[in-house]
Image (cartoon, helix red, strand yellow):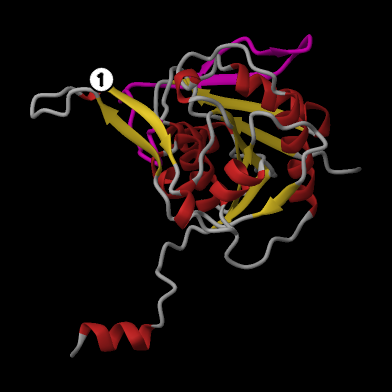
Amino acid sequence: MTHRPLFLLTNDDGIHSPGLRAAARAVRDLGDVLVVAPATQQTAMGRSFTGRPDAALEPVPFEVDGHALRAYACEGSPASVVRHGLSVLCRDRRPDLLVSGINYGENVGISIGASGTVGAAMEAAARGIPALAASQQMHPDHFMRHEAQDWSASEHFLRLFARKLLAARLPQDVDLVKLDVPEDATPATPWRLSRLSRQRYFEMVLDDPGLHSRLRDGRITVQVDQAALEPDSDVHALVRERVVAVTPLSLDATSRADFGALREALGD
């Protein structure tokens, strides 16, 4: 009997996000789909393990194109929900691929440490499960509103790379793959491998940066230093080349510096 893969779908925008349904639509006919997502918006929670202490997985109706999928929501951060879902729902069947997204807004540059989309994928990767974190570029004003979007290009590339990851034997040190789709992409848009840019990319701007300014008064903006932008980076691919950025990520955050040179710099 041919093995039918199991996709575990999650996100950081919450169970009701249209981006999550777009992800389900992209992979639904490739295998079995189990949806386990935060009950509410959890953007920028990173890989934190937070949530209501008495939170539990609650079954929710979840339909895609007339097909009912098994779905659960939980009041917790994306990584917490993935951890709990794997422990409770996947004891007898290990997912073949975790898909996190499709996120409202790109996740590029060194700001990805705050990304709940990437954090959820990291939690699966830390348990040895191949993971794909998918995001669609859009203006920051849309990140929290979940307005209608055209997901067709993102669905195409998510499906493409879901199939690739199911079939591939990834090299050592590739624990998860990050996918960022330009807002004006089509299924014909090229893709390329990219490195994580060292640029911050997202910046918080305060209209009144005084001592008693409030966090909620800040506006998220995109700021790119074009002169210092690395040509092989995810930011360059997305912003300047307008191609799909495919970034392999590692859970090993150890610096790649030469230890001999570092020992010399630190002294005895």
Q: Residue at left 18%, top 90%?
A: 268
Camera-nearest residue between 130 and 2 = 130
The percent coordinates of residue 63 (x first, y second) are 70, 12
Camera-nearest residue between 149 and 3 = 149
Can residue 19 be seen in this snapshot? yes
What is the magenta segment's predominant secondary structure? Answer: loop
Q: Secondary structure at mark 1?
A: helix
The percent coordinates of residue 100 (x first, y second) are 58, 35
In the rendered view, tell whether residue 213 sits above or below residue 100: above
The percent coordinates of residue 4 (x first, y second) are 82, 38
Q: In the picture provided, is 52 more to the left or to the right than 142?
A: left
Magenta highlight range: 44-73
* Crowding at mark 1 (Cα within 10 Å: few <14, some 14-19, many 20+): few
In the rendered view, tell whether residue 79 sits above or below residue 177: above
Q: In the picture provided, is 254 more to the left or to the right than 157?
A: left
Q: In the picture provided, is 91 more to the left or to the right than 171?
A: left
In the rendered view, tell whether residue 178 sits above or below residue 149: below
| Magenta segment includes 53 | yes
* Residue on which disc 1 sits: 216
Q: Residue at left 74%, top 29%?
A: 153
